[in-house]
Image (tube, rainbow, N blue to C red):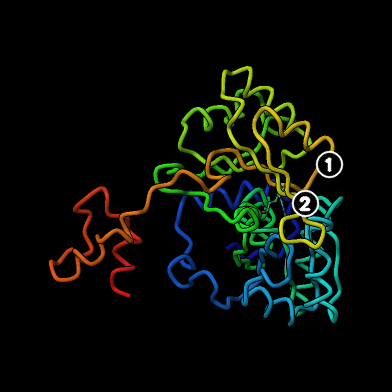
Amino acid sequence: MSDTSTETDPQSAIDAQGEIRRAELDDRIFEHSAGDQQEGIPFVGAGPGNPRLLTVAGRELLETADLVVHAGSLVNSEVLDAYCDHAETVNSIGKDLEELIPLMRDAYKEGRNVVRLHSGDPAIYGAAIEQMDALEHEGVPTYFVPGVTSAFAASATLRTQLTLNEVSNHVAFTRPQGKTLTPEEDHISDFVEMGDVTTCIYLGTHAVADTMNRLIEDGHDEDIPVAVVYHASWPDEDVMIGTVGTIGEILEEAGHRASAMVIIGDAVTGAGYERSFLYDGWANRGSDSGAHADTDETDEQPETDQETTTQ
Ligand SMILES: C[S@@+](CC[C@H](N)C(=O)[O-])C[C@H]1O[C@@H](n2cnc3c(N)ncnc32)[C@H](O)[C@@H]1O
């Protein structure tokens, strides 16, 4: 962290912090764990919407905040109503770094408890780190407090897992081409092509029909299941379930153009999986044979199996 209190333009600050990141590891990585109370401005994940899905750490920070800078309509106002009644709240939507950084820096330096509230988890399409680097450059420490990302809320709503034995071995968090990604940088078709990936699309509600058309043009099966969960965990949550061939029209009728999670893959249905090694005798077989040892002896022994056998 730089100790300067001079006002630097955010891009120079980000560049300077990038150099520091490249040159040396931040001591705080080894001094603190996620969830610890730390000095500085916390970048808190508000979770997907339902105030009950905020972490305990996030709730404590909001309840003692003087200033909460939140991500506008991306954060359910119920979270603010529930935990931030006493605090000044500022909507960050429409504000650039040039406005946001001095706002948070000055409040922090005046001794106020400042919380930056992002939707879901700030590490997923949150653009948090650029704010953090700019603040750090101004002498204001920052840290992450994780939240429940919307893909996890959507999978809970759908009553399924994103990984399913023999169905989906991997999860991709992605977004479609548009202003930010070129067509070459859009990998949705590549993930679907892999067959055993559950593809979770953020920031793609407005583009579902186009995305599905591209999948069909690329030769993918029109019957691959697709779910769209609008406002997962909010009171007006809406769930649409179809396939690559049908979901575009279903969504068009529902009329949602933003704030939905799109999940592609067989895991959407939760069907067709095989029972796991974990609850298929492996755990007991290991109990008196030393198989609990913390080794990578077999590829078929997931790390979580090792932990579960000790419970
Ligand atoms: C800027 S990104 C932020 C993602 C957020 N950091 C997270 O972890 O969920 C916004 C996108 O996240 C998804 N999203 C956020 N909250 C959602 C919710 N409650 N239900 C469904 N999708 C949501 C939508 O795809 C939306 O376009």
Above or below: residue 55 compared with residue 250:
below
Q: Nearer the viewer, residue 107 or 34?
A: 34
Above or below: residue 169 compared with residue 35:
above
Left/right of residue 129 with respect to residue 297 in the rendered view? right
Residue 154 rendering spot, x and y as whole percentages: 65, 53
Q: Residue at x 47, y 32 (%)?
A: 195
Please identify the quadrant where the C terminus is shown.
Answer: bottom left
Q: Residue at x 61, y 76 (%)?
A: 39
In the picture, the disc for residue 238 is 2
In 3D space, how far apart are the residues under numbered discs 1 and 2 (Cα atoms)?
9 Å
Identify the mark nearer the N-term, 1 or 2: 2
Q: Residue at x 60, y 62 (%)?
A: 2
Left/right of residue 303 with respect to residue 154 in the rendered view? left
Residue tagged by mark 1?
254
Residue 286 rendering spot, x and y as whole percentages: 19, 65
The furthest residue to the front: 272
User: Residue 250's image quarter?
Assistant: top right
Q: Nearer the viewer, residue 189 or 127?
A: 189
Q: Residues within 10 Å of mark 1 (few under 14, many from 20)?
A: few
Q: Residue at x 14, y 71 (%)?
A: 288
Please identify the quadrant where the N terminus is shown.
Answer: bottom right
Q: Which type of secondary structure does the marked residue at label 2 adopt?
A: strand
